Amino acid sequence: MRGKVALVTGGTRGIGAAIVRAFREAGATAVACSRSAKGPGTVRGDVGKDAERIVGEVVRRHGRLDVLVNNAGVSDPAAWKAGLDAVTPAMWDRILRTDLWGTFACARAAARAMRKGGKILNVASIPALVGDRDGLVYSVAKAGVIGLTKSLAVLLAPRIQVNAMAFGSIETGWVDWLAPRERRAYARAIPRGRFGKPEEAAELAVFLARSDWVTGQTLVLDGGEARV
Amino acid sequence: MFFDSRGGGGENAPPVIDRRFEGKSVLVTGGSRGIGKAIARAFHGAGAAVTICGREARSLVLAAKEIGEIACVPADVRRDARKLLRLLGRLDVLVNNAGGMEHHGDFEGSSPAAWRSTFELNLFSAVEVTRAALPLLRRSRGCVVNIASDVGRRPFRMGPDYCAAKAALISLTRYLAAELAPAVRVNAVCPGPVVTGPWSKPEVREAARRTLAGRTGRPEEVAEAVLLAAHNGYMTGAVLGVDGGAARSP
């Protein structure tokens, strides 16, 4: 990925940070974006509100954009464990604003900047494919991301490849929300018998960032959990 | 974790050497031509000890000459699965790539013999080779990569038997991912149209039209996905579409 410029939203923690590291190891210039980002190699912004500015800032600094990873998403244990009756319009709007609109807005801004081609990688999740007890609104947003991925792949072909990564249980911040017993139960439900590592998620991102012929796909990385 | 076997980049950038599979033993069935040969070459380039098998001794020798130090075994995967696996003392990655389309035709004209033959070549061979390889794969905590096809996800005019056999191979992949877990991982790679034989220009054009990319793929592009599936320790039960966007499920 030498000479390539990548933007990773939600790039300062968890899977996003692992993708930034992997892109840099592969020789790319990777910029991490988040609401609280600071320091070199970062852009501060909220993808739900500032997509144009975030993408514009990367292009202004580095002169180009080759890869966008839409990884930013709402991370909130209260929304995650909300049962049917606890879902509110405000929660719905907040999650879809970031996870779905933020993904679309960043993709649109990036597609304008990727004049000679590029890659857009969207982070989805297996609840979008099989449903989920704990993350109803989240599953809706991620199902939207998968539909968006396919439409963008059609609309932006053949110039830009657009793919989604449907991750299963990757060991990041949300695992701290689980009690030890819950954590064991989660791992038992995964054929591979464990949570995934952020570095394993990043390996898939590097593959997609380099592939010119994979597009419109939803690639599942979940230790065998969904099998769809 | 990431290695670029293709070099590239600036002229002064040192070539990065890919050793992802150093010390690993890989078997690629149908490895003497086309996609199989590209897969064998990619594993060899990543440091693996590669064995290929195929029906034609001559093309096996040519492939070995071309790739370098790899072992080749003349074998027909429909009959020789156990014999083939007895030759290996260790196996980390099995790539069930052997398969193919023996005939073209619509459903109405298809014969029971044609269906049987297609399933033998594309499904039963993978079943038998995988079964024979299991003791070695369990010992190495290895993995299987099945080479299916985009037409196994989204049927296309390539014969109902071929599309159904590839769909069955995809289903087998997902089934085995659960049954063989956690020790052995099983994934499928579904190439779209990749021109490796004597295709006519109109055939290539028609194949390219079923993709979003507007072109057919290169064997190396499929091989990259096979190496990813073999290397990533959390990937199992996955079906990787490498097809220019021809099939877009799930």
Image: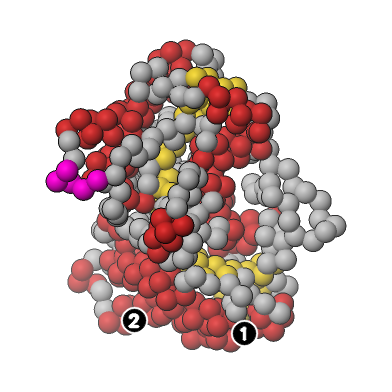
Can residue B185 be seen at all in this image of the molecule? no
Q: Identify the image quadrant of the N terminus of chain A.
A: bottom right
How far across and down, in percent of the image, does residue A17 sit?
59, 61
Taking the image as drawn, is residue B184 in sight?
yes
Q: Position of residue B226 (x, y in %)?
A: 50, 43
Residue A174: x %, y % from top left:
44, 58
Q: Which residues are magenta?
A: B105-109
Q: Which residue is mark 1?
A: A56
Q: Which residue is mark 2?
A: A93
Q: Residue B113's spot in the image, x, y percent?
A: 20, 30
Decide whether the magenta segment is chiefly helix, strand or loop: loop
Judging depth in this view, the residue of A23 and B111 nearest the camera is: B111
Residue at image point 46% right, 24% down: B55
N-term mark: 1 or 2? 1
Q: Please tell me which residue lies in front, A180 or B69.
A: B69
Label 2 environment density (alpha carbons within 10 Å; few <14, some 14–19, many ≥20): some
